[in-house]
Image (cartoon, helix red, strand yellow):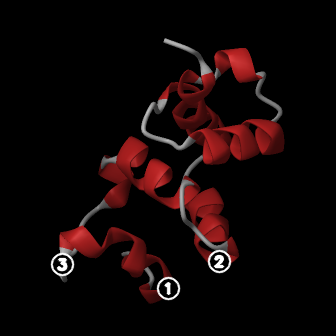
Amino acid sequence: MIPEHVRRYFWDLGQQEVDLAAWPDYAIARLLEPGDDEAVAWMRETFPRPEVERVIRTERRLSRRSANYWALAYGIPADQVAALRAE
């Protein structure tokens, strides 16, 4: 179940109930980018740290600003973050 305070980050899903645990990359990336403290706290409770770290490392759709912030927050070297590597 998606709590009401988190549902707004998944506006494109409408009112349908979606199992975000089945789509962890999508859910985590959505909350890493614009998520507020409450949404990020829910993300951390819902998804294991290694899964969040994997998304930070591999998700190219994160903005450079968000990717840099989360890399620092999780202690991930910038050269291991896809969104921060030059193409």
- Element class at badge 3: loop
- Element class at badge 2: helix
As displayed, is residue 20 above or below residue 6?
above
- Element class at badge 1: helix
Residue pictured at 50% horizontal, 85% vertical: 5
In depth, the one of 64 and 11 nearer the eye is 64
The dot on residue 38 is: 2
Judging by the rendered image, the residue that carries numbered circle 1 is 5
Mark 1: few/some/many CA within 10 Å (<14, 14-19, 20+):
few
The dot on residue 78 is: none
Q: Residue furthest bottom?
A: 4
The dot on residue 14 is: 3
In the drawing, does residue 5 fall left or right of residue 14?
A: right
Which numbered disc, 2 or 3, marks the residue that appears first in the sequence? 3
Marks 1 and 2 close (CB-CB < 8 Å): yes
Mark 3: few/some/many CA within 10 Å (<14, 14-19, 20+):
few
